[in-house]
Amino acid sequence: MDWIIENKDWLFSGVAIVAIGAIIRWFKGNNSTPTNKQVQKGGDSSTNIQVGGSLNIRNKNDDE
């Protein structure tokens, strides 16, 4: 407890926050799995389109 009181300036400075964040990230590990998973289910004779962003579908009649 005395160490925290003596080093409160360093402990609560930006350097300490970065160091603590790096230690937490190191313990947590590198999780390269995406958090946004898409799941697609389709029935028989169905057309399924899965897009991660924007999709624009034009009809043949739109050209006339």
Image (spheres, rainbow, N blue to C red):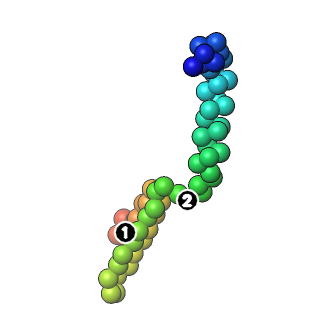
Q: Where is residue 46 in the image (x, y as percent from the top left)?
A: 34, 82
Viewer-nearest residue: 49 or 13: 13
Dividing the picture into quarters, in which one does residue 9 lie?
top right
> Above or below — where is 43 with respect to 30?
below
Viewer-nearest residue: 19 or 44: 19
For badge 1, the amino acid type reads Asn
* Circle 2 Cα neighbour tier, 10 Å, few/some/many (<14 / 14–19 / ≥20): few
Dividing the picture into quarters, in which one does residue 21 lie?
top right
22 lies left or right of 63: right
Dividing the picture into quarters, in which one does residue 3 lie?
top right
Q: Position of residue 8 (x, y in %)?
A: 60, 14
* Disc nearer the start of the sequence (1/2): 2
* Residue at image mark 2: 33
Q: Do the residues bearing badges 1 and 2 touch, measured as CB atoms within 8 Å?
A: no
Residue lying at 61% horizontally and 27% vertically, measured from the top left: 17
Residue lying at 58% horizontally and 48% vertically, measured from the top left: 28
Residue lying at 63% horizontally and 52% vertically, measured from the top left: 30
For badge 2, the amino acid type reads Thr
* Residue at image mark 1: 59
Instruction: Tell me how far mark 1 sits from mark 2, CA to CA.
Output: 37 Å
Q: Which mark is residue 16?
A: none
> Above or below — where is 35 with respect to 47?
above
Element type at mark 1: loop
| Extreme-bottom residue of the structure | 44
Front position among marks 1 and 2: 2
Quarter holding the N terminus?
top right
Q: Where is residue 25 in the image (x, y as percent from the top left)?
A: 61, 43
Viewer-nearest residue: 28 or 41: 28
